[in-house]
Image: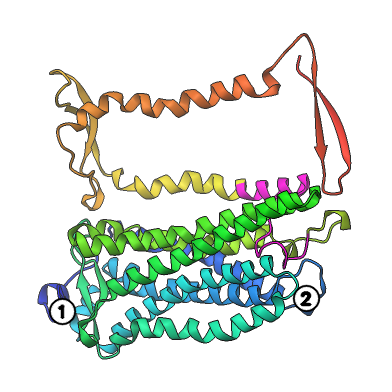
């Protein structure tokens, strides 16, 4: 049974594309994925250089292989999921999809999406397992890791296939989405799999199991890193362990977000299917968190992508710490990074809100009577006649009670930030003409002292 299929229906065959909010939702991922793929290729090119493996801060080759596979599967998952969900949701392909029959090509897109998704679920656990072995067995880890890789790589390809093999006889088809998606917004689904199996249950089990295993490995690594801090009196060892722990925390956050995102979506789909389309709007962005964060974190924090500095500023070998060591940057490098971020973020900050307010351009503003507890004559400024029929969600009567305190909530940030800045920053302190000494430590451990008068 093909639920909500659009194939062969005249109203969909004659569908005319109109611009809706689904179109920018499909375009935005292309904007941030393009530079991310470029960073992935740059990491691949840097690690492929023969000189890389002769340096003290080179990456463990097992970790390198896992990261490259991770980048590959994330990119393939993004492309297949874009074809399965984001692109059909715009309505650009609706008329064409309705004019053809359900087919195996659509099934292949759905199959590949979840095949690559299952690979992505497994790889963080494998990465954590390798790093755990490196920490617990610093001498014997090359042999142990080699055996783990020999066993795990075939399993990496086999488990996703077993989880999706029931779709082999199925047919893929285009399915109409529910609200808040507009009429004509579709996505690719399947029908007719073996044994009547449903992909949602398999995906839920895989998400919970792999997330649990990955978190267990990560907790063990944190325990080992903290144990090394207490067992060693060396200040450098403590600093290295703290960097590794910070790196591990960032990495854990990046891969946990998609786990939570997909698990919640699957549970809602199985329990409250009428609400699932509200979550599906944001699902691609949740999945892309891990895809985008990992390569950027690796590129900006790992020493192999930085210019060689003084030997005193080198950090320990990758085998002892983590795959994503966080190194203290010099003030000059920090200035360069911050300048680049500002050059990009300031225009984005001004352009980004336009994506969510452009529909107000043809609208007309008017005064609107507020409901209780506001008295007669209390009004607010509203709008009517926005482009494409995009309006606010309908709100119940008690919303006006919340609107009483809403301005105070909004003003918290406006008021608190300048007061905290003024009362705590040393620039604004003046105590009997005293001066404040600021010590700057650069990457070569050279200390320079500058004196800044406060009056």
Front residue of 215/395: it is 215
Q: Which image quadrant for residue 50?
A: bottom right
Which dot, 2 or 1, sits closer to the camera? 2
Front residue of 246/330: it is 246
Which contiguous range is marked in magenta?
A: 316-341
With respect to residue 195, does 271 lie above or below? above
> Which label's residue is closer to the chain start, 2 or 1?
1
Q: Which label was assigned to residue 53? A: 2
Q: Residue at the spot x=72%, y=50% of the render?
A: 229
Residue highlighted by disc 1: 2
Q: Position of residue 183 (x, y in %)?
A: 18, 63
Q: CA distance from mark 2 to mark 1?
A: 54 Å
Q: Residue at the spot x=29%, y=57% of the render?
A: 279
Secondary structure at numbered mark 1: loop
Residue 28, visible in the rendered structure: no
Determine whether, in the image, residue 129 is placed left or right of residue 447: left
Determine whether, in the image, residue 168 is placed left or right of residue 255: left
Q: Which label was assigned to residue 241? A: none
Residue 337 is covered by the magenta coloring: yes
């Amino acid at each position: 049974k093909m639920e909500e299929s659009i194939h062969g229906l005249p109203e969909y065959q004659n569908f005319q594309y109109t611009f809706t909010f689904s179109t920018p939702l499909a375009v935005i991922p292309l904007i941030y994925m393009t530079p991310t793929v470029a960073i992935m290729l740059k990491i691949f090119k840097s690690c492929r250089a023969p000189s890389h493996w002769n340096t003290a801060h080179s990456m463990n080759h097992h970790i390198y292989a896992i990261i490259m596979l991770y980048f590959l599967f994330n990119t393939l998952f993004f492309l297949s999921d874009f074809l399965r969900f984001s692109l059909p949701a715009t309505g650009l392909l609706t008329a064409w999809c309705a004019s053809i029959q359900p087919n195996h090509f659509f099934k292949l897109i759905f199959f590949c999406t979840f095949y690559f998704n299952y690979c992505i679920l497994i790889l963080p656990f494998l990465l954590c397992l390798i790093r755990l072995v490196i920490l617990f067995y610093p001498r014997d880890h090359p042999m142990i890791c080699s055996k783990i890789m020999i066993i795990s790589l075939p399993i990496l390809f086999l488990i996703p296939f077993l989880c999706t093999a029931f779709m082999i006889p199925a047919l893929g088809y285009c399915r109409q989405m529910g609200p808040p998606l507009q009429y004509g917004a579709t996505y690719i689904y399947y029908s007719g799999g073996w044994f009547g199996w449903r992909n949602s249950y398999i995906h839920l089990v895989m998400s919970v199991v792999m997330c649990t295993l990955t978190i267990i490995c990560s907790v063990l690594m944190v325990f080992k890193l903290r144990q090394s801090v207490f067992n060693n009196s060396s200040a450098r060892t403590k600093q290295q362990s703290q960097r590794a722990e910070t790196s591990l925390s960032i990495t854990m956050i990046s891969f946990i977000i998609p786990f939570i995102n997909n698990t919640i979506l699957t549970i809602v789909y199985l329990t409250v299917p009428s609400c699932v389309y509200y979550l599906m709007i944001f699902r691609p962005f949740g999945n892309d968190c891990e895809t985008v964060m990992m390569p950027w974190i690796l590129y900006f924090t790992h020493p192999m992508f930085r210019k060689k500095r003084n030997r005193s500023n080198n950090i320990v070998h990758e085998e002892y710490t983590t795959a994503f060591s966080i190194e203290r940057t010099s003030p000059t490098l920090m200035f360069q990074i911050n300048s680049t971020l500002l050059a990009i973020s300031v225009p984005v900050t001004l352009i980004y809100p336009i994506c969510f307010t452009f529909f107000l351009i043809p609208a007309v503003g008017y005064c609107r009577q507020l409901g209780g507890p506001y008295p007669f004559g209390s009004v607010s400024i509203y709008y009517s006649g926005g482009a494409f029929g995009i309006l606010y969600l309908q709100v119940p009567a008690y919303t006006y009670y919340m609107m009483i305190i809403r301005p105070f909530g909004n003003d918290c940030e406006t008021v608190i930030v300048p007061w905290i800045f003024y009362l705590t920053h040393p620039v604004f302190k003046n105590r009997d003409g005293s001066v404040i000494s600021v010590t700057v430590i650069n990457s070569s451990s050279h200390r320079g002292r500058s004196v800044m008068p406060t009056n």
